[in-house]
Amino acid sequence: MVIKAIKLIAITQLLVFLTYFISVGFYANLQVAFLSSFIIMLGSFYAHKKMVDSKVKTESFESERDALDVIDDPHELYDETPLNDSEELDLKQIVKEEKKKIKTFNLKSIKEGGSASFSLFRLGGYLFLVLGFIALKNNEILDISVYLPSLLVGIIVGYIASKEIFA
């Protein structure tokens, strides 16, 4: 699978290099936009895979209901588990159990949610995006009509390559 991703990247880079013969400015805009969005996509997939693997390893994930069931019954009012009539409901105990289910905003939750957001590989891609844009603008070769579609190309190739690499 990795070989397919490498072939895809090599073919894409060959096509990008062929634009050098059209114009140096066209090539520079295409290459900077493509690489920055490609690196961001790879970093995002890598960070997400790492986060999921760590949750599976520690078994800290919660079993979620079916998406359709969540839409139809968001508060679990039509839960199919039968209630025993002889069993008395202890409201204080129910409230305590429901409070345990509520996730509080603490350092642990920040670490869990932030691990995918603050991946160095992903942040490096964003840094490359900003610095590349500034460099193109300062050298007066920035062409938005080339730059923006090139971001899309990098996203598509990055998505396909990430699926091959991290699947």
Image: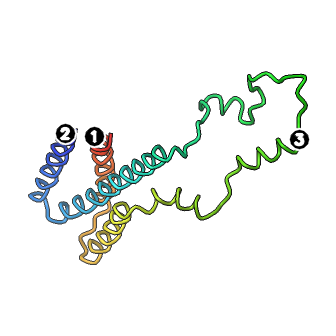
As shown in the figure, which amino acid type bears the numbered disc 2? Lys
Colouring scheme applied when the structure was drawn: rainbow
Quadrant in the picture for residue 109: bottom right
Task: Name the foreground residue: 26 vs 79.
Answer: 79
What's the CA distance linking mark 3 and mark 2?
A: 58 Å
| Numbered disc total | 3
Q: Which mark is residue 91?
A: 3
**Measured along the vertical axis of the image, is residue 140 above or below residue 51?**
below
Q: Are marks 1 and 3 in contact (CB under 8 Å)?
A: no
SS at circle 3: helix
Q: For the N terminus, which image quadrant?
A: top left
Q: Could you tell which of marks 1 and 2 lies nearer the N-terminus?
A: 2
Residue indicated by mark 2: 4
Q: Residues within 10 Å of mark 1 (few under 14, many from 20)?
A: some
Q: Could you tell which of marks 3 and 2 lies nearer the N-terminus?
A: 2
Q: Say which of marks 1 and 3 sits in front.
A: 3
Q: Which mark is residue 154?
A: none
Q: Residues within 10 Å of mark 2 (few under 14, many from 20)?
A: few
As shown in the figure, which amino acid type bears the numbered disc 3? Leu
Q: Residues within 10 Å of mark 3 (few under 14, many from 20)?
A: few
Residue indicated by mark 1: 164
Residue at horizontal 16%, vertical 53%? 16
**Measured along the vertical axis of the image, is residue 41 above or below residue 142?**
above
As shown in the figure, which amino acid type bears the numbered disc 1? Glu
SS at circle 2: helix
